[in-house]
Image: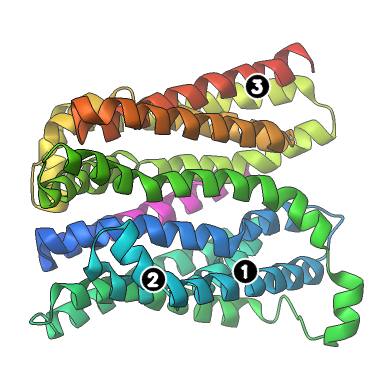
Amino acid sequence: MKRKLINSFIILSGSTLITKVFSVFNRMLLSRLLSEQGMALYILVIPTLSLCITLAQFSIPSAVFRLISHPKYNNKKVIISAILICFASCLLIMLSILCFSQIIAHDFLKQDQAYYPLLTMLPFIPLVAISGIIKNYCLGKEDVWTLSVAQLLEEVARIIFTYFMIKSFVNLDMTYLVSIAILAMSVGELASIIYLYFKMHRKVNVTYHPIEYFKDHFILKDMMNIALPLTGSRILHTCYNFIEPIVLVAILTKLNINESDIHMQYAIISGYVISLLVTPTFFNNVVLRLLLPILNKDIAYRRLRDLRKHVIYGVIVCFLISLPFTLLFYFWGDKCLLFMYNTNNGYDYLKYMSIPFTLFYLQTPLSATLQALNKNKEMFMMSTLEVIIEFVCLLILTPRYHVLSVAMVMLIGLFTTLVLSIYHVYKYVYREA
């Protein structure tokens, strides 16, 4: 068991590391192929894309992961139910984008050039939903090799498409180049889906009579019990990320600060600094994926001592993972920014955010514990409180600290969530268990 767990961790960590390197390389490539204005537009559109994906997926891939590893459910029930739910949600979101993309670009993002990049999101939405379902199925079945190859193939296809398309059409308007960069995401997802289909179609035969199978196997209630609280939390955070630049621009333009300067500074903090800080979290995601089934078994078999031990181990592992990255960003952050984004703008932000940002890494094992305990309501309330505090702090701090308030607000939110998570884990694992 331990050997299998270690092997899975090594394989998944290694592949995720390589995937992350490719992802970082893609961001570096974009920063060189696009102008600073192009990168600013790209970063401005990404929160909207994240919101659409969150709504379209409806946390169904996460539910697939939870259900597929449970002996109570068979593969067909889970996969078919997940696809049907995602089909409906994706269709709704795609129609909404078609109808309201111009309004979002002009009235919300305050950037008419965002119209075509928003439309380019359309093929990505169903592709990422399908890909997420199949990937989480592989994870639930502990097929880490297939998952790893799919992740690598996705990033490679994305990089190749981005490079050759932007190089080929380098004279196009910046708006179209940014649209190509977003379209590359769809190409990557499509490549991974094709690979996963040929690997998995024999293992999961979903041939069925549509009506009868729908009646007998559609497990909507079980999916929703997991998906709804997760979706609620993700929507809150994604909505905040969507609203944040809008509120920031609205406040600072009233203070007679140039709008292009606002976008540029926001791109430095959000697109460069914060993106770099969250890069090491892929290790934490691996820990979450492998730790959650272990905690589930500890709870199912009432192994309280093992549960407490595994929670502590998870915190220690995540801290040890975060420490070298914290030191790297603090002492050599300028070199990291120059290497990744071809600029050292934002070094001061990166240096002083790196130490408190360690709190973000420690959140992973606490979240896994609360998920295993099925404390979905508590997690949703925590997310709600965090977003409310962040929004209020943004309104208060922005007039005084300008774009710097984005970093300050994020750290306040992280600290709030960590304190609440520690309280709930202590309550349910150490005091009441």
Taking 151 as reference, is 426 above or below it?
A: above
Q: Is residue 282 left or right of residue 44?
A: right
Nearest to the observer: residue 51 or residue 156: 51
Query: Which image quadrant is residue 36 in?
Result: bottom left
- The residues tagged by marks 2 and 3 sit, at their Cα atoms, a distance apart of 42 Å
Does the rendering let one see residue 321? yes
Residue receiving disc 3: 425
Q: Nearer the viewer, mark 2 or mark 1?
A: 2
Q: Earlier in the sequence, mark 2 or mark 1?
A: 1
Give the residue displayed 16% in from the left and 45% down from the top: 262
- The residues tagged by marks 3 and 1 sit, at their Cα atoms, a distance apart of 33 Å
Query: Residue 54: horizontal and vertical position, in percent?
Result: 53, 57
Residue receiving disc 2: 101
Nearest to the observer: residue 358 or residue 183: 183
Instruction: Look at the image and give the residue range highlighted in magenta.
Output: 1-22
Q: Does the magenta stretch include residue 325?
A: no
**Which type of secondary structure does the marked residue at label 3 adopt?**
helix
